[in-house]
Amino acid sequence: MAGLIHHEKEKIINTKQLFSYRCPSCNFRGATDLLAVGHYFSLNWIPFWSNEVVINSVCGNCGYFVHQKELPAELKKEAESFKADNKAPLWMFSGMFVMGAIIVVILVFAFFNEKQSDTYLVNPKVGDKYEMKLTSNWILDNEYTIFILRDFTKDSATFDCNDRVVYKTSGLSSIDKPENYGQNIIKISRKDLEEEKEFNIVIIEREGD
Ligand SMILES: [Zn+2]
């Protein structure tokens, strides 16, 4: 995605003092710590996903640092059990949780809107507002407008069509004004409407619901 800044970061999530271990550099006993370091990616400074926890060691006396790959054999077992105890904390996955939650909300809303539109189509009410997609081919931009249901019978529906169009559904509220109606009245067979033969219904809205 454009505009996103991607970072790879790391943070110490836990330490463990090795009381009987002697530092190979300064020979000082008990000053070396194991460090559990969580590595994670962030997008726009939001922690997104952690790919691993790495165990390093550092001597508090002389600063001698050993990366997981170079840990001496005598520390391997200790390091492995420390690693098993220290999973990446959940905050390192914050962005993923937030994104997952947003997707779920969008899907639930889409599902709810579709169900409700189906109900309104089958049981119409004068005044229902139909957001319509007028063109759908990949050369022209899609055009959207609003049809207001003025009358209906068992077989047909009569709409007062807004005489303006917009190119994004988000712009529909800007043309939904009384002066844009009253010029184009059309009658459509309800069967054609339900099968979306002439127009594609984006959503049907009913005042008060
Ligand atoms: Zn040392």
Image (cartoon, rainbow, N blue to C red):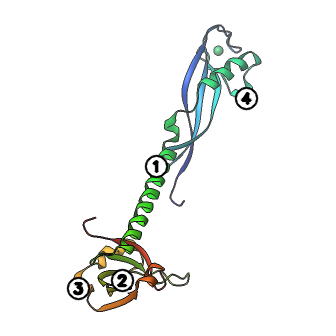
The residue to which callout 1 is attached is 101
Residue mark closest to the camera, 2 vs 1: 2
CB atoms at circles 2 and 4 under 8 Å apart?
no
Check disc 4 and report its element: helix, strand or loop.
helix
* Ligand 1 positioned in quadrant: top right
The percent position of residue 65, horizontal first and vertical second, equals 65, 23
Tell me the distance, in whole angstroms, between the alpha carbons under discs 2 and 3: 30 Å
Tell me the distance, in whole angstroms, between the alpha carbons under discs 2 and 1: 42 Å
Residue 142 visible, this angle? yes
Q: What kind of residue is marked 3?
A: Glu
Residue extending farthest to the front is 154
Residue mark closest to the camera, 2 vs 3: 2
Task: Describe residue 91's horizontal placement relative to residue 17 as left or right.
Answer: left
* Corner quadrant of residue 116: bottom left
Residue mark closest to the camera, 3 vs 4: 3
What mark, if any, has residue 69 been given in the picture?
Answer: 4
Q: Give whichever of discs 2 and 1 has the lower sequence position.
A: 1
The percent position of residue 160, horizontal first and vertical second, equals 30, 86
